[in-house]
Amino acid sequence: MGFADKYLQKIVHSDNQVFDFNGLPETPLVVIIPAYDEPEIDLCIRSLMACDRPDNPVLVLVLFNSGEMSSESVRQENRRGMKRLDALSQELSNVSWFYLRTALVEDVRKKKAGVGFARKTLMDHAVGFFNGVDRSDGLIASLDADCTVSPNYLMELSKVALADRNLFYIHYFEHPIDSNKALHRGIVDYELHLRYYAEALKSTGFPYAFHTVGSAFSVRAEAYVKQGGMNDRKAGEDFYFLHKLTHIGTPRLLSGLTVYPCVRLSDRVPFGTGPMLRKWNDQGEDLSVSYPLVSFRKITTLFDRVDHLFVSNDVMLEVDPDVAQFMNSHGDIDKLSQLRQNCSTSGAFRKRFFHLFDAFWVLKCLNFLIEHGFCKDTTLSGLISLGLVEEKDSTLEALQILRKREILENK
């Protein structure tokens, strides 16, 4: 009986068994790539093919997908892309370590169609592959079709798959920056915001302050199954999935490899890099501002008192009034009382507290504070207040400082 038999029996896809795993060798690493209207997907695959050769085989799964509402041009692009990759597979027929498999799924119901459905379908099939070769420790790496990777990407992931036992990982990423391109300023501001947000969240005492980027994480097959698999949200699937995994572990950041997400305008998903750049480019969206540090400081007044909350709700009188107001409006005080009754130790209470007051709760609270009079401020101002950059630093210099900091802290 395989480790994932029960999980695989429960999931139902209209595209069951779209990948042919016949003749594939056992491998500890599967890379999954959803593809929707990606005319340059070849660059992604060739980037993987150009990676330093690991000691073990690697399987790459690409799912070209479109919904029932997708245009004919999208469908045609998907079909062309699949034909190109199938031809590429022929070039790999004599390569003993790199295995590429593609599949095409069309007319996905409107309710389901989207990147979440595609990523879930791919990851479920990766679990099916690992279940067949009895590798519950197999590593599933999530990538996007518009990314390239550092030459050591596959080698580092293979080493982790074999020599490390963490349940899931966050991959270091950098958006390519070219000062000659029109999107340069927008992507610098956007990535700086992402890195500032993680640092500000960390400063509150929140234990799970990490980036949630769909193209930059990996998870063990056993952990994936244990937490019920990926969701099929149309956007934000990575955020919800990765934070659900914190119920069973804490991610390790792999800073020795790099994922390079493409810098482009996009409307493939409701939010994310592409849509934000489009808003910036078309509508003048200000990407240089973020949630003010004062709003994170307010949340800190709650997180600093977790151990005291295990004893009594009386300590809520010491929590910032605006945060307390948000909590009262969402029934959080009653939830705290129920949580206390269900936990026998302060350690258990602390762990479950941060699953209740999770990253999504933080985001909702920050938005509540903005709606109630706290204006966004420049990202640079927040970083200066955190003591991470100086007033003389430009946004590009600040971004470079944060990138180096993240790598050094996780060596």
Image (spheres, grey):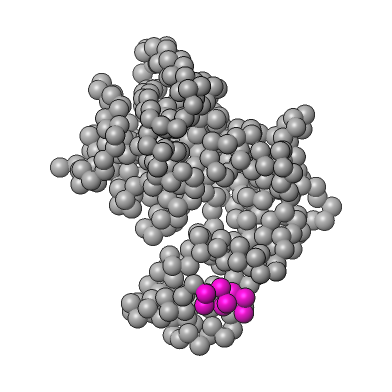
Is the magenta region chiefly helix, strand or loop? helix
Seen in the picture, residue 148 relative to 9 is either above or below; the reply is above
Above or below, 291 relative to 69: below
Residue at horizontal 48%, vertical 35%? 143
Residue placed most toward the observer, 218 or 379: 379
Quadrant of res 372: bottom right
- Residue 246 on image: x %, y %: 42, 57
Q: Residue at x 24, y 34 (%)?
A: 133
Q: Nearer the viewer, residue 317 or 166?
A: 317
Q: Residue furthest right?
A: 392
Query: Could you tell me which quadrant the N terminus lies in?
Result: top left
Residue 321: give x, y in percent of width and height: 62, 79
The stretch of residues the image draws in magenta is 321-329
**Is residue 191 in view?**
yes
Residue 199 in the magenta stretch? The answer is no
69 and 374: which is toward the camera: 69
Drawn side of residue 259 relative to residue 231, left or right: right
Total labels: the figure holds: 0
Where is residue 100, by image quadrant? top left
User: In this view, which residue lies farthest toward the left?
Assistant: 1
Q: Residue at x 27, y 32 (%)?
A: 16
Image location of residue 369, percent across then percent down: 64, 68
Picture layout, residue 32 above or below residue 395: above
Per the image, is 328 magenta? yes
Q: Position of residue 313 (x, y in %)?
A: 48, 85
The reply to whether residue 59 is visible in this rendering is no
